[in-house]
Amino acid sequence: MQPVVTVGLDGSPESLTAARWAADEAEKRGLPLRLLHAWPLLAPEPAGVPAEADQNYWANRIVQTAQAELRAHHPGLEVVGDLVADDARDALLRAASESELTVLGSRGLEPVQSYFLGDVSMPVVARAERPVVLVRAEAAEGTAPSAAAGRVVVGLQPQRAGDDLLDFAFRSAAARAVPLVAVYARSVPLHARVPWGLDHDVTKELTRDARELLSGALRPWRDKFPGVDVADTVRLESPARAVVEAAEGAALLVVGRRRHRPGVAPRLGPVAQAAIHHGHCPVAVVPHD
């Protein structure tokens, strides 16, 4: 199957923002964009039925409205509408297995959760075998965040950083022609804590060791992507807090998710959870071994 970027549409402002972001991303990658709307009650297309009697009217309108807008702003981009008679979560999981990238809208932690973030987004992010990007709506303007500005931030645990995660992060930075910031954070162990604060000698050694690990993990990718300006950051604090803070104002935050073993329920780690719920920029969750 031809590689494609898929975005889930549910008629909400969040999903339309995600569609705009996905169109920019598909254009950067030179891939078609698929607009997916799933509705279990979708009926076979009727012939010669007036709009007011067509039970598929609103489903078609959701896709066609987005399609018209995106084609107008991206005249060279192939934009395909896809209506499926299925549960949204199942449809998106199936689409994610076929797509280069799947994009969904989200509201982060607001009082009223969006449809995709609540019942659909989280299971898709936790189970998808390929990267999923969650895009928050801009409350003030209702437009997609600019992917051309800022930087790409990737949260890493060097000992467990899979190739898929680093490949996605470096390719994303290269496509945008922006710097990549690699963040490695680790909590300060108990033996480094003293009554007056932190033992400077211990924290200095921890920082040095962490920087060596991070540099070693990044070295082959710096060689593979010589055009990407890379900054490595080591922090002795909560990894979740460090990654979210580092991504403030970024074009994209990239975090990893370990692929689940057979028989083990899929889940997101604390860093991915924090990024999804508290990050303000688009968040890419990349499954890796």
Image: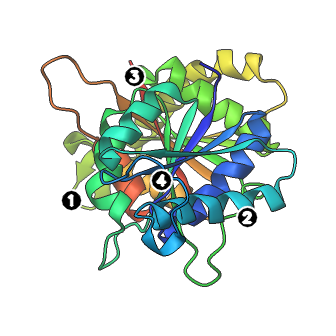
Identity of the amino acid at label 3? Arg
Q: Position of residue 103 (x, y in %)?
A: 53, 47
Q: Which mark is residue 9?
A: none
Identity of the amino acid at label 4? Pro
> Is 135 rendered above or below residue 181?
below
Distance from the alpha carbon under mark 2 to that under mark 4: 25 Å
Tag 3: Cα neighbours inside 10 Å, few (<14), some, or many (≥20)?
few
Q: Which residue is mark 4?
A: 46
Lower sequence index among marks 3 and 4: 4
Q: Is 34 positioned to the left or the right of 263 in the image?
A: right
Farthest-out residue, left: 263
Tag 1: Cα neighbours inside 10 Å, few (<14), some, or many (≥20)?
few
Lower sequence index among marks 2 and 1: 2
Q: Quadrant of the C terminus?
A: top left
* Figure coloring: rainbow
Give the secondary structure at mark 4. Answer: loop
Lower sequence index among marks 1 and 3: 3
Distance from the alpha carbon under mark 4 to that under mark 1: 75 Å
Lower sequence index among marks 2 and 4: 4
Image point (34%, 70%), residue name: 109
Farthest-out residue, front: 48
Q: Which residue is mark 3?
A: 160
Q: Which residue is mark 1?
A: 195
Q: Which mark is residue 69?
A: 2
